[in-house]
Every structure is written in structure tokens, then in C-alpha cells.
Image (cartoon, rainbow, N blue to C red):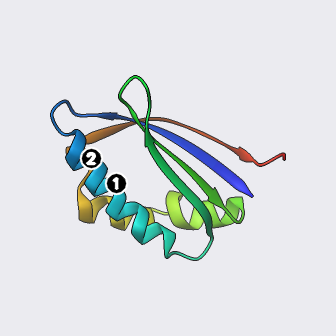
Amino acid sequence: MYVVASLWSITPGQEEEFVARGGKIADLLRQTGGITSFLGFRTDDGHGMAVVGYESKEAYDRIVTDPNGPFAKAAAEYKIEEVGEWIQSWRGEQTH
């Protein structure tokens, strides 16, 4: 499994909207073939984090890095960048 953890800053005052929009994106991505798990949460310091498991790096590339892929379409549809900003992601193969 290929795992990606992504950290987002949430626009002050937009916390509930970020969670709502992020939840809609998560629901769409959960229905996409190639995703094995999806966990979203708020960090102790108020950031948003998503930890997503993919069947493979190829599945991740198809879903996320393709500019016309499912993530790009969902992010544009729900305008997630109006309420948050992507900071960083960590990616790698699951070891155990």
C-alpha cells in the first residue's frame, strides 16, 4: 500500500467549512477505485490532516497527480483552497 499524509492550514474562521468541504471530497475519493483507506482529522495545533492509503503509487498518481484526475476535479468542485491551503505531504510505501 502507498500512503500519503497531507497537512493543510485552515483559514481562520473557516474551520467548519473546511471540514464540510473536505468531507465531501473524502466521500468522492472513497468511491474512487484505488483508495484503500481515508482518514481526516484536525491536529492539536489546528491544522487539517488527511492520511490516505492507495493500492499503489500508480493509483496515487492516477487519482492525485493527474491534473484532470479525481482529486483535482473534487478540489475544484468544492473549492477547498478557498478555506484552506495545502502545506506539505509525506508519501511512501507502507512497511508494516
Q: Residue furthest right?
A: 96
- Label drawn at residue 22: 1
How many labels were placed on the picture? 2
Front residue of 53 and 86: 53
Left or right, residue 82 beside residue 75: left
Q: Is residue 71 above or below residue 22?
A: below
Say which residue label 2 marks. Answer: 18
Q: Residue at x 57, y 67 (%)?
A: 62
Disc 1: CA contacts within 10 A as few (<14), some (14-19) or many (>=20): many
| Image coords of residue 13 (percent x, y) | 15, 33
Callout 2, which amino acid?
Answer: Phe
Q: Residue at x 27, y 56 (%)?
A: 21
Q: Residue furthest front?
A: 44
In this view of the protein, can residue 69 be seen by the observer?
A: no
Callout 1, which amino acid?
Answer: Gly
**Secondary structure state at the residue bearing disc 2:** helix
Whether pointer 2 and pointer 1 mark residues with C-beta atoms closer than 8 Å, the reply is yes
Disc 2: CA contacts within 10 A as few (<14), some (14-19) or many (>=20): many
Question: Could you give the CA–CA distance between mark 2 and mark 1, rounded to whole angstroms?
Answer: 6 Å
Q: Is residue 33 above or below residue 83?
A: below
